[in-house]
Amino acid sequence: MEIIDKYFPTLTPEMRQQFEQLGELYSDWNAKINVISRKDIGNLYEHHVLHSLGIAKVITFREGTTVMDLGTGGGFPGIPLAILFPDVHFHLIDSIGKKIRVATEVAQAIGLHNVTLRHTRAEEEKLMVDFVVSRAVMPLADIIKIVRKNINKTSRNAHPNGLVCLKGGELEREIGAFRKVAEVTALKDFFAEDYFAEKKVVYVPILK
């Protein structure tokens, strides 16, 4: 939890309590349903919670914004972002039912009221939102092809509506056709830990 305080020192007491609860909850659930690598659960706050919050270093979602988390797994980046932005609605989807079960139980346990969850394939989700966020490993072009149908036409944030992905490594080829509009932000500019040396936030506006 100290690493969250380090980079987000202005959390409200409620936010801080919710973040603190994540450690025990994910450890307990991961022992039953493996949604995080067993070798990595000890790095929950750095590799999963803080990594998710990297999106908040790039975009500040205004009150009333709607966000869909594509391929949320056990709830990342959606649950940490929902804690940080309590006035924003997050809709978490995943095609694997047991992962949505874990994310649902965690969200309920910490009292998140701005989250809905659904077991579904992204291709079948029809909800309209302002942004789609994802840590999914799917190539950027494939994600955009799937979620273009879900993006609202009218923007309410400083950034036009679109896709915000957490990515790692070399992205030149993957960004390709989106090079003129994509914004790539290195998380090492915000987080000093070695884990973030090659981690990036990629934002692509999706204009109808």
Image (tube, rainbow, N blue to C red):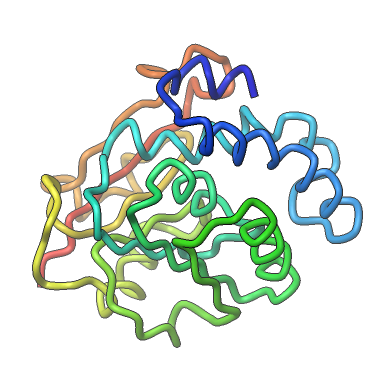
Depth check: give the residue in front, 123 or 72: 72
Position in image of residue 141 (x %, y %): 33, 63
Quadrant of the image for the C terminus? bottom left
Q: Is residue 149 above or below residue 65?
A: below
Q: Residue at x 59, y 55 (%)?
A: 111
Instruction: Locate residue 140 relative to residue 148 in the image: left or right.
Output: right
**In which image quadrant can residue 119 be found?**
bottom right
Depth check: give the residue in front, 188 or 176: 188
**In which image quadrant can residue 133 be found?**
bottom left
Position in image of residue 200 (x %, y %): 40, 34
Q: Residue at x 56, y 31 (%)?
A: 16
Instruction: Locate residue 138 relative to residue 101 in the image: left or right.
Output: left
Q: Residue at x 45, y 46 (%)?
A: 81
Quadrant of the image for the N terminus? top right
Q: Is residue 193 above or below residue 63?
A: above
Instruction: Locate residue 76 relative to residue 126 in the image: left or right.
Output: right
Depth check: give the residue in front, 196 or 131: 131
Count of number-bearing discs: 0
Depth check: give the residue in front, 39 or 65: 65
Position in image of residue 72 (x %, y %): 56, 60
